[in-house]
Amino acid sequence: MARSHDKYADFEGLREQAVTLRRAGLSRRQIRDRLHVHNNDILNRLLEGEPPPEWTKRPNAKDDLKGRARELRLQGWTYDQIQLELGCSKSSISLWVRDLPKPERRDPAEQAKLANRMRWDHELAVRDEQRRKTKDAATAQIGELSDRDLFMAGVALYWAEGTKDKSYDRRETVIFVNSDPDVIQLYLAWLNLLGVEHERLAYRVMIHITADVEGANCYWADLVGVDVSTFQRTTIKKHNPKTVRKNVGENYRGCLVIRVSQAAELYRQIEGWWKGMADSARRDHGLPSSGKV
């Protein structure tokens, strides 16, 4: 016991250390372990008048969880369902809701359906999080886009989505149609890289008659940075009552058509660029010839 009392002989010096550690943001447990003071009465005296740091008040963060647990319990949820929804322990749930009336016993079949739905909702949330992580990691892999990267992407994008010349219908026009805003902006960046003047671009919206035509025109004009009054006449698609359209709702804005004027030479270049890319892919990666001349 004498040795124990000796440890606290310099009380004021120990208190000074304790106060310094407290003001540095340490918790009671951290101070106790740092100073080897395992007597709670003495620890209380050492820290008398010193408020705890904010981070040690984290248990209050459970107040929102507690409130949500009580709401769910009042709606008739079981402990298992609340635990699955909130991710907290049953012991905590029991402590938070024990004063509330027990929910009426559900029909076993209904209970099983609800439990299955809860599990499935949880599984979907996990999958969504996995999707998000994969997409974020893939986005980070791209990094900066060089001029050559953009050039190659633009050629492939045009050949997939743009109009193409046919042997039976020689037009050699450069017209691009798409409904994805990101695709439209990448395409415009590509045209800018090629030195195509903005004055050579003409815009037109293609959209179903049942949609918000005026709103769609304003949306696309804002996206490409031009006045909506410069848009050509909108192409209206009539609705076929025999088909069930899925592209409906407030996010449906039709397609934007972008036409480059005086573009015969540009079209021939695009076709040549694409042929060069395709030939190189076959030659460098051991793919069979397409048979085209």
Image (spheres, helix red, strand yellow):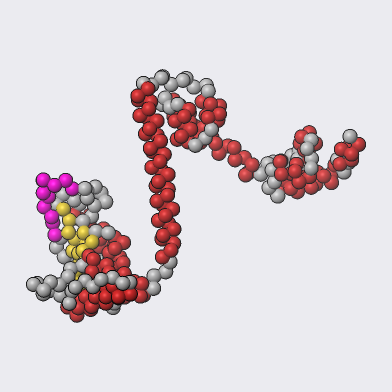
- In the rendered structure, the answer to whether residue 175 lies left or right of residue 63 reads left
Q: Residue at x 59, y 40 (%)?
A: 58
Q: Residue furthest left?
A: 168
Occupied quadrant, residue 258: bottom left
Q: On the picture, is 33 further left or further right than 179?
A: right
Name the residue: 71% across, 41% down: 29
Q: Which residues are magenta?
A: 235-245
Query: 267 or 231, which lies in front?
Result: 267
Q: Which secondary structure class fits the magenta region best?
A: loop
Please tell me which residue lies in front, 291 or 170.
291
Which quadrant is the C terminus positioned in? bottom left
On the rendered image, what quadrant is the N terminus found in? top right
* Magenta-drawn stretch contains 27: no
Horizontal and vertical percent position of residue 197: 25, 76
Residue at left 31%, top 67%? 186
**Is residue 20 rendered to the left or right of residue 290?**
right
Residue 116 position (above or below residue 285): above
Q: Position of residue 32 (x, y in %)?
A: 75, 41
Above or below: residue 142 compared with residue 207: below
- Which residue is situated farthest in the bottom direction here? 265
Residue 284 in picture, x, y percent from top left: 33, 75
Placement of 118 over or under 204, stated as above or below: above
Q: Is residue 237 magenta?
A: yes
Residue 263 appears anywhere in the view: no
Q: Which residue is located at x 86 percent, y 40 percent?
A: 8
Please tell me in which quadrant of the rendered image residue 213 appears: bottom left
